[in-house]
Image (spheres, coloured by chain):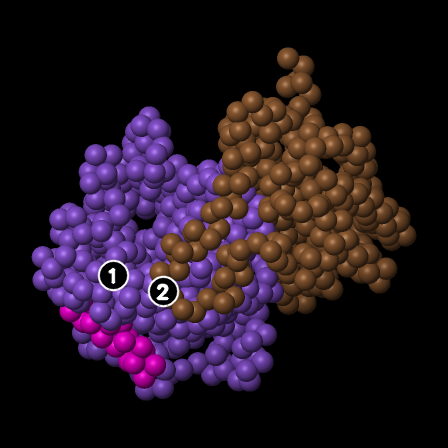
Chain colours: A purple, B brown
């Protein structure tokens, strides 16, 4: 991508650079008061990994309870709290910040040839805001939990629930502002800090997806913020807004909640799509097929994403006509999503495909996201949706997109850029093993849930009729495999920090400005300002091959 | 004319020996780039603010449609004179703010400080009038919640068995965290504090709070009750939104006052010059935004009964 000529045929073993951002100060203060976007990315990585495991713990409780039809391990109250806290932790404190805050923070300035994000101090403050919010959520969980579901439907959440709704809502509100500021920072960075010659259509597709994500963060999250404030006012001061007993309209809450929370699922999936675009081209060693289509489809998803929220409310008493329109627009989202999927597949065609760990995750993403996306069309269909609303079909669909799509893309990106972040290679064999274990465990966990849902098993109940047990046992067994798959990368990635082979600037022979600088990058990212003269992904046929 | 143009020429990207403006951060190549980034950042923040208030405006729209008459009747209880006065004060403060930005761009330190102080004074007047208006609502018990009272002039409220509290007593009670009368059944947030048993509290709790709502609802359903009675649930929603919207606006004003104090301090220290005035300009944008929100709030909350009363 830049004019710097790269020596691809290295024979000498790589060595770690003498000065890089990781050894630029070792004290705790040098981390907690850093304004370096790369260090902030690492801080986020540690924070969200912690909350991922808290959320995972809650999921474990849910799956263990569902092993048997009777409510034996957890009573209904405890079960309600377990699935609520699973949702709250995973969505607000892991999935929403996952790729933008970790990989995005680390990579956006590197990929556009900037020294830092536009507002480095705001970036640090954002991490503190996020951590404060997430700790509020954790405090709510420890001091009693919350049982409304992650959706906080009124009037249950404002009037009847006796759990820590207020503290959880405040936590989400605070973390929401972190999301807004991250989005703001990225938008300004991408607009104003691009290296000379880096025009919009020379931007890596990861940047396009981050940009689209940032737009949703900035436009959607404030609506969630005001909604949660109104919930808090109604609950705390008995000011009537949503409670029908006070003249309010609970369906208005659902509209306002989903106005954020549907675009929020695109906050969660779009960055993943950006990662997949990078990894598929790098490991096919081939130009991406249809660059502009993939880039603009990210924006299309962001725009359509704001117009489909009421498909969550087909059974909530909205008018048939508005349901019809929302159903139609929901179908439209499939178009840009399919454009991406087809272009990724076309990129593979006649590429020099390497089966490295990131590529395994990318393949898994392609398959699982396709299933998740297509079952989304089932749910957008008015008639079928009435049948499967609030069943495990929805749970399975959501997890195919969020875990099969987003979490796998996150792991994919983490492995792909791990050499850049740490300067060391992860061990390939356990990497591949973990990817396969996760793929198998994931499908075993969630595929039976499609069938369960279609058979009519409702979600959010701790007990179920005995005829559903076989599929539930399969699902729980899959969840245990999945848990092992998630723990493995923790172990070998930590191991590689000390024992991994030094990676060198560009272990994957990939294009992109981030691979032009040393691994780990120096504190100011580049020596001199990179100047971009070519399109991205300029992989010649066999040209860059070792 | 443009004070930034000379900077643009003076600072070529990445010339190590190029003179850096003392206010330029290391990751920007030029002051121009830094200025444009800050400015874009502020505009993106304001777009975020529009969406934030947008949620409130949507709620307003929905409930005004649902309780059309009640909104008009409840709106009539507001003091249009005070609202109009405040509108004028706030537009005046936007003028002084614009003049402050102008002074900063021209590097006139004393003039800048004068206009910041004037803007702060006008902002304080606005908030002071708001306090007067809120106090009146407290005294009339037109505050949504357990003590909400919306009766014809002179009639006693029937939804609470005892005499209305005085304003200081209400404030005292709110200040100590007792938002509801001690004699009432446990409210959710109080129950939350004692939570822990984790049994089927949901249903039992529902029973304990229900009667309080029913009493108030029943008032609206009494046959032959006055127009004002029938509009009661809608009126309570109106006041909920009135306090939520003007409250959010006031919070933005208070934050703005704090920021102005900070800007004033730095202006006093001579931080801003013809080549660096971004914080003043960005704050100006924020202040104008807060002003514009009020320009929407004033007709929506104060003036809506004008034409309803006409037919």
Question: Magenta-highlighted stretch: main secondary structure?
Answer: helix
Q: Is residue B156 above or below residue B256?
A: above
Side (left or right) of A57 relative to B75: left
Looking at the rendering, the stretch of residues picked out in magenta corresponds to A476-496
Other residues around mark 1 within 10 Å, as few (<14) / some (14–19) / many (≥20) = many
Image quadrant assignment for residue A48: bottom left
Q: Residue at x 80, y 30 (%)?
A: B81
**Residue A352 in picture, x, y percent from top left:** 18, 60
Magenta span contains residue B246 = no
Outermost residue toward the bottom? A499
Q: Residue at x 66, y 23 (%)?
A: B305
**Residue A298 in picture, x, y percent from top left:** 37, 45
Mark 2 to mark 1: distance in Å?
Answer: 14 Å
Q: Residue at x 60, y 47 (%)?
A: B146
Outermost residue toward the front? B161
Give the secondary structure at mark 1. loop
Q: Chain of mark 1?
A: A
Q: Chain of mark 2?
A: B
Give the secondary structure at mark 2. loop
Residue B199 — which label?
2
Other residues around mark 2 within 10 Å, as few (<14) / some (14–19) / many (≥20) = few
Check the picture and name the quadrant holding the C terminus of chain B: top right
Q: Nearer the viewer, residue A302 or B272?
A: A302
Q: Nearer the viewer, residue A351 or A110?
A: A110
Residue A462 — which label?
1
Q: Nearer the viewer, residue A521 or A541?
A: A521
Q: Are marks 2 and 1 in contact (CB under 8 Å)?
A: no
**Residue B102 in picture, x, y percent from top left:** 81, 43
Side (left or right) of B287 relative to B103: left
Q: Nearer the viewer, mark 2 or mark 1?
A: 2
């Amino acid at each position: 991508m830049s004019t710097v000529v790269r020596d691809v045929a290295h024979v000498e073993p790589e060595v770690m650079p003498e000065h890089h951002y990781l050894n630029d100060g070792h004290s705790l203060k040098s981390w907690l008061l850093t304004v370096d976007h790369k260090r902030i990315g690492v801080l986020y990585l540690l924070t969200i990994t912690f909350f991922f495991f808290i959320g995972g713990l809650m999921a474990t409780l849910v799956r263990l309870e569902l092993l048997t039809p009777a409510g034996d391990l957890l009573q209904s109250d405890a079960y309600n709290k377990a699935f609520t806290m699973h949702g709250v932790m995973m969505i607000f404190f892991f999935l929403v910040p996952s790729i933008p805050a970790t990989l995005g923070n680390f990579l956006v300035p590197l990929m556009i040839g900037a020294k830092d994000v536009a507002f480095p101090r705001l970036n640090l403050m954002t991490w503190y805001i996020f951590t404060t919010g997430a700790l509020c959520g954790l405090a709510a969980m420890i001091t009693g939990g919350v049982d409304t579901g992650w959706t906080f439907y009124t009037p249950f959440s404002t009037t009847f629930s006796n759990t820590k709704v207020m503290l959880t809502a405040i936590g989400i509100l605070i973390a929401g502002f972190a999301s807004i500021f991250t989005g703001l920072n990225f938008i300004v960075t991408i607009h104003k800090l691009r290296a000379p010659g880096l025009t919009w259509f020379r931007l890596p597709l990861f940047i396009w997806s981050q940009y689209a994500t940032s737009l949703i963060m900035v436009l959607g999250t404030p609506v969630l913020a005001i909604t949660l404030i109104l919930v808090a006012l109604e609950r705390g001061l008995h000011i009537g807004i949503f409670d029908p007993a006070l003249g309010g309209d609970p369906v208005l809450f659902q509209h306002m909640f989903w106005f954020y929370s549907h675009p929020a699922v695109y906050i969660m999936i779009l960055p993943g799509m950006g990662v997949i675009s990078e990894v598929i081209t790098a490991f096919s060693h081939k130009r991406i097929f249809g660059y502009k289509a993939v880039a603009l489809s990210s924006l299309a998803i962001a725009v359509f994403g704001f117009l489909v929220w009421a498909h969550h409310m087909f059974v909530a008493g909205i008018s048939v006509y508005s349901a019809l329109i929302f159903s139609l627009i929901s179908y439209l989202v499939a178009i840009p999503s399919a454009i991406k999927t087809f272009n990724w597949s076309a990129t593979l065609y006649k590429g020099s495909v390497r089966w490295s760990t990131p590529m395994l995750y990318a393949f898994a993403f392609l398959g699982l996201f396709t299933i998740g996306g297509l079952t989304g069309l089932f749910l957008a269909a008015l008639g079928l949706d009435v049948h499967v609303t609030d069943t495990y079909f929805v749970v399975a669909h959501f997890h195919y997109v969020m875990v099969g799509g987003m979490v796998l893309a996150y792991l994919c990106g983490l492995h792909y850029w791990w050499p850049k972040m740490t300067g060391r290679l992860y061990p390939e064999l356990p990497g591949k093993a973990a990817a396969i274990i996760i793929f198998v465990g994931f499908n075993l966990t969630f595929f039976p849930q499609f069938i369960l849902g279609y058979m009519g098993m409702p979600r959010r109940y701790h007990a179920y009729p005995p005829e559903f047990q076989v599929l539930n046992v399969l699902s729980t067994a899959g969840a245990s495999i999945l848990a092992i798959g998630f723990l493995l990368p923790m172990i070998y990635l930590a191991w590689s920090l000390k024992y991994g082979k030094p990676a060198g600037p560009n272990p994957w022979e990939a294009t992109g400005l981030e691979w032009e600088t040393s691994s780990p990058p120096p504190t100011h990212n580049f020596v001199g300002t990179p100047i971009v003269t070519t399109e991205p992904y300029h992989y010649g046929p066999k040209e860059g091959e070792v | 004319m443009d004070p930034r143009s000379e900077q643009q020429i003076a600072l070529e990207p990445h010339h190590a020996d190029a003179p850096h403006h003392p206010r330029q951060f290391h990751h920007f190549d030029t002051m121009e780039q830094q200025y444009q980034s800050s400015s874009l950042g502020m505009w993106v923040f304001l777009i975020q603010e529009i969406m934030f208030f947008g949620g409130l405006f949507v709620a307003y729209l929905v409930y005004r449609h649902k309780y059309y008459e009640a909104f008009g009747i409840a709106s009539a209880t507001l003091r249009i004179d005070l609202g109009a006065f405040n509108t004028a004060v706030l537009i005046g403060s936007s003028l002084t703010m614009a003049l402050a930005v102008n002074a900063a761009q021209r590097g006139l330190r004393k003039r800048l400080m004068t206009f910041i102080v004037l803007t702060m004074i006008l902002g304080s007047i606005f908030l002071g009038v708001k306090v007067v208006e809120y106090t009146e609502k407290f005294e009339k018990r037109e505050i949504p919640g357990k003590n909400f009272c919306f009766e014809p002039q002179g009639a006693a409220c029937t939804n609470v068995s005892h005499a209305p509290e005085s304003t200081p007593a209400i404030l005292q009670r709110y200040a100590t965290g007792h938002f509801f009368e001690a004699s009432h059944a446990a409210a959710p947030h109080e129950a939350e504090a004692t939570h822990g048993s984790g049994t089927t509290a949901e249903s039992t709790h529902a029973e304990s709070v229900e009667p309080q709502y029913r009493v108030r609802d029943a008032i609206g359903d009494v046959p032959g009750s006055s127009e004002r009675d029938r509009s009661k649930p809608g009126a309570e929603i109106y006041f909920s939104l009135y306090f939520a919207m003007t409250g959010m606006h006031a919070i933005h004003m208070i934050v703005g006052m704090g920021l102005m104090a900070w800007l004033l301090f730095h202006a006093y220290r001579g931080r801003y010059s013809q080549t660096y005035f971004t914080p003043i300009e960005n704050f100006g944008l924020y202040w104008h935004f807060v002003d514009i929100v009020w320009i929407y709030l004033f007709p929506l909350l104060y003036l809506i009964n004008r034409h309803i009363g006409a037919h």
